[in-house]
Amino acid sequence: MEKMQWTSLLYGWIILFGLLFISSFALGLFLKMIDMKETTLSWTTFIIGLVILFTCGFITGLKGKAKGWLLGVLIGIGFTGFVFLVQFLGYQQGFTLSQAMYHGFYLIAAILGGIIGVNFSSPAEEK
């Protein structure tokens, strides 16, 4: 991978964790103010996660200008790896089957975002 793609990957991860922090804070404030059922909360967080990973894949593909599928895979795997490490090291639990399924959808969203982002970018300049 070229330096430009590594830089775009770094941008994607920074934006990913920034958006996750902001959305977690906003969702926490929202939950403090209203009563929400557990099923509604799980669907809300799932949809927010899909949108964030698609957006970060899109931005990474837009900045990377090539190999959007690979950039999307790296964004998705980075997110899944981070969640797994926090869950395993912090709570001594592995992934359940439903969590693995959710993270599969997150990975697909990041890949699609990366592919679409590359197609929206201007062509990479030849050296």
Image (cartoon, grey):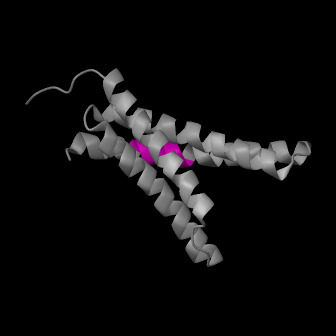
Q: Judge whether residue 62 can be spotted in this image.
A: no
Left/right placement of residue 86 relative to residue 37 reads left
Q: As rendered, which of 64 and 80 lies closer to the eye?
A: 80
- Whether residue 62 appears in magenta in the rendering, the answer is no
Left/right placement of residue 66 relative to residue 29 reads left
Q: Work out whether 121 lies above or below 64.
A: above
Left/right placement of residue 7 relative to residue 35 reads left
Residue at the extreme left of the image, as rendered: 127
| x then y, percent, for residue 108 | 46, 43
Q: Work out whether 86 lies above or below 108.
A: below
Q: As rendered, which of 110 and 34 lies closer to the eye?
A: 110
Secondary structure mostly seen in magenta is helix
Left/right placement of residue 71 relative to residue 124 reads right
Q: As rendered, which of 26 and 40 lies closer to the eye?
A: 40
| x then y, percent, for residue 117 | 38, 29
Residue at x 57% of width, y 67% of height:
95
Residue at x 71% of width, y 44% of height:
43
| x then y, percent, for residue 76 | 44, 50
- Whether residue 13 appears in magenta in the rendering, the answer is yes
Quadrant showing the C terminus: top left
Residue at the extreme bottom of the image, as rendered: 92
Residue at x 65% of width, y 75% of height:
91
Q: Judge whether residue 86 can be spotted in this image.
A: yes
Total labels drawn? 0
Which segment is the magenta one? 11-17
Q: Quadrant of residue 90?
A: bottom right
Q: Work out whether 85 lies above or below 32.
A: below
Q: Work out whether 73 lies above or below 96.
A: above
Residue at x 52% of width, y 46% of height:
105
